[in-house]
Image (tube, grey):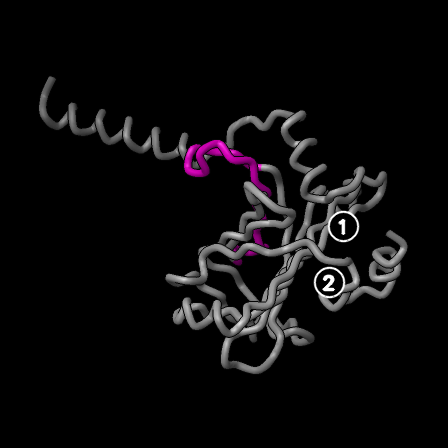
Amino acid sequence: MSRLVFIALAALLISGAARAEDEPRTVDPAASAAFDKKLFAAPMDADMTYACFRRRYDAAHLAQHARQKVSAMKLLVIARKPSAENREAYSFKLGFNYRGRKGNWDSSGYCKHAQNEITDGELRLSCGVECDGGHISVGLPRDGDGAVVRLERIRIWQTGKPDEENHEALVAGADDRMFRLERTALKECEPLVEDEEERLAMRQR
C-alpha cells in the first residue's frame, strides 16, 4: 500500500469517527420519559407542560468568577404536542442580564433529546436558535432540583427589540460555559413569554 493511499484511508477513518462522535445516539424512550419526569417535575400534560428555572448570582459568587459576564439567568422549557405549526415537541426561552450592563436580553429556539459520546452518555435537551443562531444544552444536575445550561455561542436580542439586524451573541468564556439554575415558580418566567394567551395558559398550570 502506497503512503498516499494509507494517508487517505487514515483520514477517512478519522473523519468518520469524528462524525460518529457528533451524531446523536438513538435515545431510549424510557430514558427520555424519565428525563422529562425529572425536568418538568410533573406528569406531562396532553397539550403543554412547562418548567421554569432561574438564578441570580450574588456578589460573593461574582467575586470568585471575575470573568463571568452573566449576572442572572432564567430558563423556560416547554413541552407541547406537535402540530402543523409547531413540529418540534420541545422549545426553550432564555433570559439573562449582563454584569455591569443595563438591559434584559433573551433568546429562544427548539429542542430535542440528544445523547452522544462527548457528554459521557448523559441525556440532555439539545436546543438551537434558527438560522445558525447557536445552541444550548439543558441537562439535569446529579443532585438537587434544577437544570444545567451549557453553551458555546447563542444569538440574543435585547428584550422587546427582536429586530433581526440588532441581534448580538452571548459567547462562552472562561466563566460563562455552564450555568446551574434552580427550579422556581412559573410566574418567574412569565416575562419571557410575549403571547398573552400563552401566559394565561402558564398561569393555569
What stretch of residues is rendered in magenta?
Answer: 114-133
Q: Which residue is mark 1?
A: 50
Farthest residue, direction front: 60
Seen at 56% across and 36% down, the residue is: 123
> Residue at image x 66%, y 26%?
29
Query: What amino acid does circle 2 point to?
Result: Cys
As drawn, is 13 to the left or to the right of 133? left
**Residue 121 % position (x, y):** 48, 32
Query: In the image, residue 37 lies at what x, y percent?
Result: 72, 37
Q: Is residue 185 magenta?
A: no
Sort mark 2 into few (<14), some (14-19) or many (20+) by Cα contacts within 10 Å: many
Instruction: Tell me the amino acid under the disc marked 1.
Output: Tyr
Q: Which residue is mark 2?
A: 189
Looking at the rendering, which quadrant does residue 39 occupy? top right
Query: Which one is nearer the viewer's eye here, 97 or 106?
Result: 97
Label 1 element class: strand
Instruction: Tell me which numbered mark, 1 or 2, is placed earlier along the sequence.
Output: 1
